Image (cartoon, helix red, strand yellow):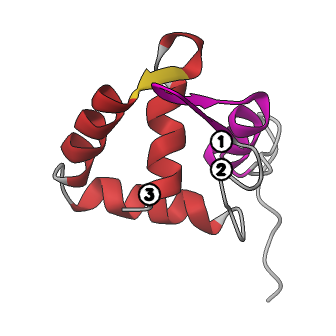
Amino acid sequence: MNFQVTVLKILVSYPDGFAPMAELKRDMAILATSGREWAERTARMAARVQNLDIFSQKRVERMNDGWRITEEGRAVLDLMEARPVVAQRPPGMNEPASEQ
């Protein structure tokens, strides 16, 4: 499980992007024990953004009683979650014939 991606995903799910530490820890524990799928998903997402450091890059701000995702954190999470664009043919166009 990628800790930093998980933190971003948890925080974005809370109102105003803020989670008290107790709730953040609870949610982290749930996701950490949720199975291989979550670990694989966060690893794929983290691979899309090299050298992610949510605190030094100001993606998350620490507050007295919890953490809050910043606009920069939301933007990097959107980038990590973006699906690659696949070129599609307009309806009615056939595949090009292969050379024989």
Q: Decide which of 77, 92 is in the foreground and name it.
A: 77
Q: Amino acid at mark 2?
A: Met
Q: Residues within 10 Å of mark 3 (few under 14, many from 20)?
A: some
Question: CA gap, disc 3 to disc 1?
Answer: 13 Å
Name the image quarter holding residue 49: bottom right
Q: Does label 2 or label 3 sit earlier along the sequence? A: 3
Extreme-bottom residue of the structure: 100
The C terminus: image quadrant: bottom right
Residue at mark 3: 3
Residue at mark 1: 77
Question: CA gap, disc 2 to disc 3?
Answer: 14 Å
Residue range highlighted in magenta: 60-84
Q: Please name the residue shown 44% across and 47% down the image.
A: 6
* SS state under label 2: helix
CB under 8 Å between callouts 2 and 3?
no
* SS state under label 1: helix
Q: Decide which of 89, 94 is in the foreground and name it.
A: 89
Q: Please name the residue shown 29% across and 39% down the image.
A: 25
Against 51, residue 64 (above or below) is above
The N terminus: image quadrant: bottom left
Q: Amino acid at mark 1?
A: Leu
CB under 8 Å between callouts 2 and 1?
yes
* SS state under label 3: helix
Q: Does label 3 or label 1 sit earlier along the sequence? A: 3
Against 15, residue 1 (above or below) is below
Is residue 62 rendered magenta in the image?
yes
Residue at mark 2: 80
Q: Decide which of 64, 88 is in the foreground and name it.
A: 64
80 left or right of 10? right
